Amino acid sequence: MNTSGKWALALLMASGLAVLPARQAEAVSTTTTYIQLFSGQPEAFVNGEKMRLDIPVQSVEEAVYVPLKWMGERLDFNVDWNGETGKVQVQAPKAFIEFDLAENQVAVNGKSSPMSGVAKIEEDRLLVKLSWIADYIGMQTKYYAGQRRTDIIYIQNPTTRYKESALPGDELPNSRPVAKFMFGKDSYRIGEPVDYIDLSYDPDAEGLPGVEWKGRQDAFFKPGDYTVSLKVTDPKGNVSDEFSRTLHIEDKVYLDPFQYSLHYVPPGSILKADKEAAIIDSSKLAAVSKQVHQYEERPLVSVVTNEAASGPAEKGFYYQEKIKGKARLYINHFNRGTGKEQLGIVIRNASGSKPVTVKTTRHGESAPSLFYRQLSPQAVADFLLSHAEDSELTVKPLDAAFYKQFEPLSPGQGLEALYDIETDGEAIVSIVTTSPGETIYDLGQYRMLEGKTKLRGTFPAADILWNADVSRVNVPSRLTIGGDDTDKLLKGRDALTGKETGSASGSGVTYTVRLERPGKAALVLVPRGGYFQGPVKVGGKIVAMPQNSVLTPLDGGLLLHRTTGAEPAVEVEWTSTSGSLLPVDLLVYPLEDGE
């Protein structure tokens, strides 16, 4: 045997990966194995019996690694050392797997790939990633992050087929599935999550596409005894008998319905304080202190046209502003006329000596639509998720060009758009509507329109950062965005009239709220000012708004995120649209498990 072969064999023997005895032929039977593993612990429970592992289960984020030899013994699949090839061979129920330890490769049914991310050697033991090997074994797994616990359910396939009946000559290979389940324990408290362990199986190992529960709830909020039933259906339509168990709910409170929602419902869910009073009165909560930084190096140029403007609809210029360096353009436009029109953004270079280049660094926009208000959050989502771009527009001295021409808008259609731009010199930005198909040379016929906008102006900052240390927050608390003494609405200036202007929605402004050392908490958004349109980005991920992207105080609060207590910080980012009204409260609810 060569050196690498000796090393691999020594490693195999040290990890206990000796040849397991081949399974003997047996009568038709189906065995269910239920295993509970705990990350970092050398102990496990197999069908309720406590057992010891020779090396603890390991986890990297939510990836769980388990000793291969131990799993093979528990679930009865062969793990062998092949001295001729120098490889560890696994005869899994659904695949033949070979680990080449010397070359750090793994082959599944002959197809090789790197072993990293799938298996690793720790303390001379071979550990495999549970979610990876689960598919080849045919077991179900579920990870409970709060308890760092992994549950495994494995139903061993029968070695021979059942027949549909015992009649002579009946060779039909299909049989009825079996419904079966158990609870994680005999009784639960009010508001305590119930563990359902599904032990159903199909004797023909064809899977169970149909599952029908009766009486199942994630938690119960009144004491008493509850009947829970289950039926399952196989791919051929055979239905099992109904299997039922009785669950006892103790007259002890673990969590009330609102606390349960804070702990367990998925982000993006609507939370209500109770059924009788849907409004969450966040104004009475303690305010969290914060440090505010306005990035005035990027002003906001905002135009919201007025659907209810008096007089006939006209085409022309809505607004004009000089910019140099960074700026954000926010446009919310509605065609209130009787014919088609085309909205455009024009860049003019007033310099007679050098060109000006405009670079787009971030953007989001919606297509013209009759339902543009409902689609506005899509433009915001695109904007929040967009990355740096390479698109540039260069305008010659004393020349002008369209930075953007939108698709023509039919009567009643609207759109929303946001652009972060940077210029290398002074430029004049104009927002204009024209007849469809007109060019830059046709703009001379149009005048500046007055009284046709709901909002137009330039605001000192498009981006606002809040830093809040919430490490000592131990009661429900709030941070209020806009509209009260803790955060005044931005005031802007109309560049054409010089008059002060303001916005009840802070349209186009991006708030980034950085919560330092949040501990274990639920983050909830409450639209105290009225209508709120999302979405919101939390920890780099978009949380979509339910109910057609509109939330009101009567609906309740929107659960944005739960922190685990291990994060040094979490960021909540939101860009306002004209459909939102401030103030908006960001609530921090410290989470404690029920007693």
Image: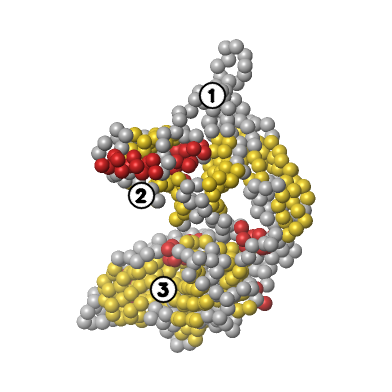
Residue drawn at x 61%, y 27% is 176
Tag 2: residue type? Ser
Q: Which residue is mark 2?
A: 116
Q: Earlier in the sequence, mark 3 or mark 1?
A: 1
Residue at left offset 60%, top offset 71%? 587
Task: Report how far apart the C-alphas of labels 2 and 3 lie in the structure.
Answer: 46 Å
Q: How far, Cα to Cα, is label 3 from label 1?
A: 74 Å
- What residue is shown with label 3? 329
Determine the residue located farthest toward the left in the rendered image.
353
Percent position of residue 534, x then y = 53, 65
The kind of secondary structure element at disc 2 is loop
For label 1, the residue is: 26
Name the quadrant containing residue 326.
bottom left
Residue 160 is left or right of residue 124, and the answer is: right
x and y percentages locating residue 57 in the rendered image: 48, 51
Vertical arrangement, residue 216 with respect to residue 300, above or below: above
- Amino acid at pointer 1: Glu
